[in-house]
Amino acid sequence: MFKPVFPYKGNQLILTSDRVTLHSKSDAIFLFGKQAVSLSSTKTINLDANEGIKLYTPIIELGNNAKKDGGPAVLGNRLNNQLYDLVNGIQSAAVLLNQVSETDIGASMQYIRSAADILYNTAQDSKAIIDNQYILSQIVYVR
């Protein structure tokens, strides 16, 4: 986190008013700072855009010390796909287990074994996804 030095010894511009408006009628407004650009408010900071808000940076922390004290954000599409695969595996095993017959245990063993294989493979796939942190962001951290 950038911590400015006070008192500042150098050229600076200080503008104080009840309201400040910068408006570009046909192009853009650019703010640059060699060490930082800081926005601060006692209430809210609002970012509004009709098409999107883009942040280009290797790390985004939402909350103080989010990377250290919080954790990575979940990648929604990847998590959704993994949950879908997990539920499909459970449903497939349930379909097989519903074919188990109390009167024909010999034939039922095939269904039980197939259901067990599906559940085992589904669990292994899910564990690999979790172990490889495939569903966790490497950029966004939240606290």
Image (tube, helix red, strand yellow):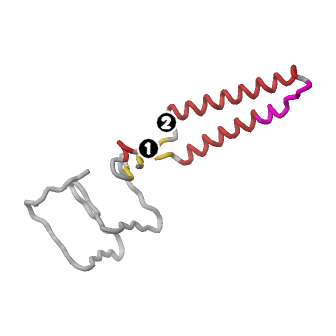
Q: Are marks 1 and 2 in contact (CB under 8 Å)?
A: yes
| Residue interval drawn in magenta | 94-103
Q: Earlier in the sequence, mark 1 or mark 2?
A: 1
Please tell me in which quadrant of the rendered image residue 34 appears: bottom left
> In the visual, does 60 lie left or right of 131?
left
Q: Which residue is mark 2?
A: 133
Q: Main secondary structure of the magenta part?
A: loop
**In percent of the image, x 25 and y 60: which residue is there?**
32
Q: Which element carries disc 1, helix, strand or loop?
A: strand
Asked if the magenta segment contains residue 97, the reply would be: yes
Residue type at the position of mark 1 = Pro
Asked if the magenta segment contains residue 21, the reply would be: no
**In percent of the image, x 85 and y 32: which residue is there?**
99
Disc 2 packing (10 Å; few <14; some 14–19; many ≥20):
few
Q: Position of residue 24 (x, y in %)?
A: 32, 74
Q: Which residue is mark 1?
A: 72
Residue 61 vertical position relative to residue 45 in the rendered view, above or below: above
**In percent of the image, x 12 and y 59: which residue is there?**
6
